[in-house]
C-alpha cells in the first residue's frame, strides 16, 4: 500500500485555537511526542509572528531529527528569510509559503490582480528554494478559487520549484464530492502535477474537515495536513487521529497506510489537551472518553460475546488498556507501577515515586481510584512548573466577607503568610497570592471540572492569568476544588516568577 504523508500542524494552526497559547518549552514537549508518534512533517510555527514562535521553531529544529521540520511564511521576503533562519539547524527543513488566490481575497484583502498573484507566488517559492530544497506552497482559500486560475497558480509554483502544493479549504466551505472533484481537476489539467505532492488542509466549519480530507485522498492527494484532537482556527482542523484510524480501519476502501505509531495516539492527545488547556469532548471520535465505552445492555452483551459486534477498532491500537486494575490505599508500588505502564506512561523513578506518594494521599480521600485519576496525577507531575513559591497551607472563612489565609514556602526556610478579603473565596485566595508574591495577575479564564464521577471526584482547576500584557496558564488537581484552584493560580504565578528570575 502507498503511504499517505501526515503533515501535523498542531504547533502552528492548532495553537491558533482561541484560548490555546503555548510557550517554547511546552511546544518542545509536544514536538517530542509528535516525533514519538512518528508524523512525517511537523509544522513547528510561524517564525515572523513573534520572538517566541521563532524561538520555538529554532529549538524544535535543533532537537527533533527524525521528522521534517516546517516553518510557515507569507509570500514576503522577510517572512521567508526569517523562516529559513529559524530552520537553520534542522536536518530536514521545509519552508511553507502561502498566498491567497480566491476572488474574494484578491478583491478585499490583497487588492491584487491575477497576474500579480502568480508573480508574487513564483517569487516567493524561488526565494524559499534559495534557502532549502523542500518548499511547499499553499494557494490560500483554494476551495473558493476559480478552478482554471488555480490550475495556472499550481502549474507556475511547481515550475518555480515547489515540491508540495497544498490545496486548502481555508474556511471549511467545501463538501466532499466537490472537494474531491477539485483535486481530480488539478490532476487532469496541471501539466507538471506529477512533479509535486498534492496536499490537503481542511477546516471544520461545517464539520466536514475529515470527510473532505479523506475524499481528497481517494481522489489522489498524498499528503494530509491535520492536528491532534482537531484543534485549530475557529472550529478547528481535520483531526489527525480520525484521519489515521480511518485509513487504518478502512484500508480495504482507501488502499493507503501511514507511518504513524497508533499506540501513541492517546498519550499524544492527552499531552496536547493538558498543555493547551483545550478539553476533549466525551464523545470525540477515537480519543474521547466514551469512544470505547458501552453502557447499553444490548451493546454490552454483544461486545462480551464478540467484540466486533460493536467495536470496529481495538482500544489497544490507540494506546488504551483493555482492562482496568482497581487501585486503592492498600496497593503497593509494584501494582501502581504496572498499572501506570498499562496506561501507556513510562515514568522515570523520581517522577514515579512522587506520583505514587500523591496517589497514596488521594487514596486516603477517595473510596475508588479511576484510571482518569491516575492520569490526572501524572499530567500534573509532568506539567509542574519550577516552583519559586509552594503552597504550604490554606484556610477560608466564608462569612459575610470571605477571607483567605494563605501560607507560602519560598525555598527551604522562608515562609510568607497573610490574609485578604475578596468577593468570594476564590477571589480572596487569588488576591492573597498576589499580595504575598508581589505579582499582580488579571484573571482571564477560570474553570473547574471533575476528572471522574462521584462526590469524592478529583477536581481539576485551570486558569489563565494576564501579567503585564502576557498570558500564563496554570493547572492543578485535588479532591478539594478550592485547593486545586489555589495551586492552579500559583502555578501560573510561578511561571511569571521564573521568567523574572531568568531575566
Image (cartoon, rainbow, N blue to C red):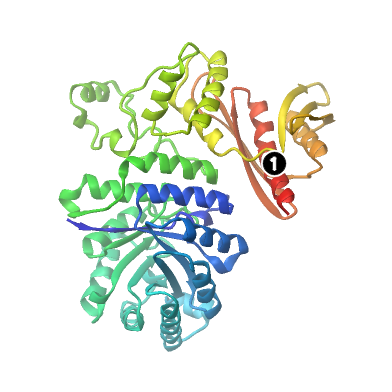
Tell me which residue sits at (69%, 41%) in the image: 494
| Quarter of the C terminus within the rendering | bottom right
Tell me the quarter of the picture where residue 364 sits: top right
Tell me the quarter of the picture where residue 127 sits: bottom left
Residue 418 lies, in percent from the top left, at: 84, 29
Tell me the quarter of the picture where residue 211 sits: bottom left
Question: Can you see residue 455?
Answer: no
Vertical order, 261 against 348 (above or below): below
| Local SS, label 1 | helix
- Near-viewer residue (240 or 253): 240
Tell me which residue sits at (50%, 40%) in the image: 279
Question: Can you see residue 260?
Answer: yes
Tell me which residue sits at (52%, 76%) in the image: 81
Residue at mark 1:
494
Mark 1 neighbour density, 10 Å: few (under 14) some (14–19) many (20 or more): many
Vertical order, 322 against 144 (above or below): above
Vertical order, 17 against 272 (above or below): below
Residue 125 lies, in percent from the top left, at: 41, 79
Q: Is residue 387 left or right of residue 8?
A: right
Residue 44 lies, in percent from the top left, at: 48, 59
| Quarter of the N terminus within the rendering | bottom left
Amino acid at each position: 500500500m502507498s503511504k499517505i504523508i501526515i503533515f501535523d500542524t498542531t504547533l502552528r494552526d492548532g495553537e491558533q485555537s482561541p484560548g490555546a497559547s503555548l510557550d517554547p518549552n511546552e511546544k518542545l514537549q509536544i514536538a517530542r511526542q509528535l516525533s514519538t508518534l512518528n508524523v512525517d512533517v511537523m509544522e513547528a510555527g510561524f517564525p515572523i509572528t513573534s520572538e517566541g514562535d521563532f524561538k520555538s521553531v529554532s529549538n524544535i529544529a535543533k532537537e527533533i531529527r527524525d521528522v521534517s521540520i516546517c516553518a510557515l511564511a507569507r509570500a514576503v521576503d522577510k517572512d521567508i528569510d526569517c523562516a529559513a533562519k529559524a530552520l537553520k539547524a534542522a536536518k530536514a527543513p521545509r519552508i511553507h509559503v502561502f498566498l491567497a488566490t480566491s476572488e474574494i481575497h484578491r478583491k478585499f484583502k490583497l487588492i491584487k490582480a491575477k497576474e500579480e498573484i502568480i508573480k508574487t507566488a513564483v517569487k516567493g517559492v524561488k526565494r524559499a528554494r534559495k534557502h532549502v530544497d523542500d518548499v511547499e506552497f499553499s494557494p490560500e482559500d483554494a476551495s473558493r478559487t476559480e478552478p482554471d486560475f488555480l490550475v495556472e497558480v499550481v502549474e507556475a509554483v511547481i515550475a518555480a520549484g515547489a515540491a508540495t502544493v497544498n490545496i486548502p479549504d481555508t474556511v471549511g466551505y467545501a463538501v466532499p464530492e466537490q472537494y474531491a472533484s477539485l483535486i481530480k481537476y488539478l490532476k487532469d489539467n496541471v501539466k507538471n502535477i506529477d512533479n509535486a505532492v498534492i496536499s490537503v488542509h481542511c477546516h471544520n466549519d461545517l464539520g466536514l474537515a475529515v470527510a473532505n480530507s479523506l475524499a481528497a485522498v481517494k481522489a489522489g492527494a498524498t499528503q494530509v495536513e491535520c492536528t491532534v484532537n482537531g484543534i485549530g482556527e475557529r472550529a478547528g482542523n481535520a483531526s489527525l487521529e480520525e484521519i489515521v484510524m480511518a485509513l487504518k480501519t478502512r484500508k480495504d476502501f482507501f488502499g493507503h497506510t501511514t507511518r504513524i505509531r497508533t499506540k501513541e495516539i492517546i498519550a499524544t492527545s492527552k499531552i496536547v489537551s493538558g498543555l493547551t488547556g483545550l478539553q476533549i469532548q466525551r464523545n470525540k471520535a477515537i480519543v474521547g472518553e466514551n469512544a470505547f465505552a458501552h453502557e447499553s445492555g444490548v451493546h454490552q452483551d454483544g461486545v462480551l460475546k464478540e467484540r466486533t459486534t460493536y467495536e470496529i477498532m481495538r482500544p489497544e491500537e490507540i494506546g488504551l488498556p483493555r482492562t482496568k486494575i482497581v487501585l486503592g490505599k492498600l496497593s503497593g508500588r509494584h501494582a501502581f507501577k504496572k498499572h501506570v505502564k498499562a496506561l501507556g506512561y513510562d515514568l522515570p523513578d523520581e517522577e514515579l515515586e512522587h506520583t505514587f506518594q500523591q496517589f497514596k494521599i488521594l487514596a486516603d480521600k477517595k473510596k475508588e481510584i479511576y484510571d482518569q485519576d491516575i492520569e490526572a496525577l501524572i499530567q500534573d507531575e509532568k506539567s509542574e512548573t519550577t516552583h519559586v513559591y509552594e503552597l504550604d497551607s490554606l484556610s477560608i472563612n466564608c462569612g459575610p466577607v470571605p477571607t483567605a489565609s494563605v501560607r507560602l514556602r519560598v525555598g527551604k526556610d522562608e515562609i510568607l503568610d497573610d490574609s485578604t478579603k475578596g468577593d468570594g473565596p476564590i477571589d480572596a485566595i487569588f488576591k492573597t497570592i498576589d499580595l504575598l508574591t508581589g505579582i499582580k495577575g488579571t484573571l482571564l479564564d477560570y474553570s473547574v471540572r471533575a476528572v471522574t464521577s462521584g462526590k469524592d471526584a478529583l477536581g481539576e482547576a485551570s486558569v489563565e492569568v494576564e501579567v503585564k500584557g502576557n498570558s500564563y496558564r496554570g493547572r492543578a488537581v485535588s479532591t478539594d476544588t478550592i485547593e486545586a484552584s489555589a495551586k492552579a493560580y500559583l502555578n501560573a504565578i510561578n511561571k511569571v516568577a521564573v521568567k523574572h528570575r531568568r531575566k
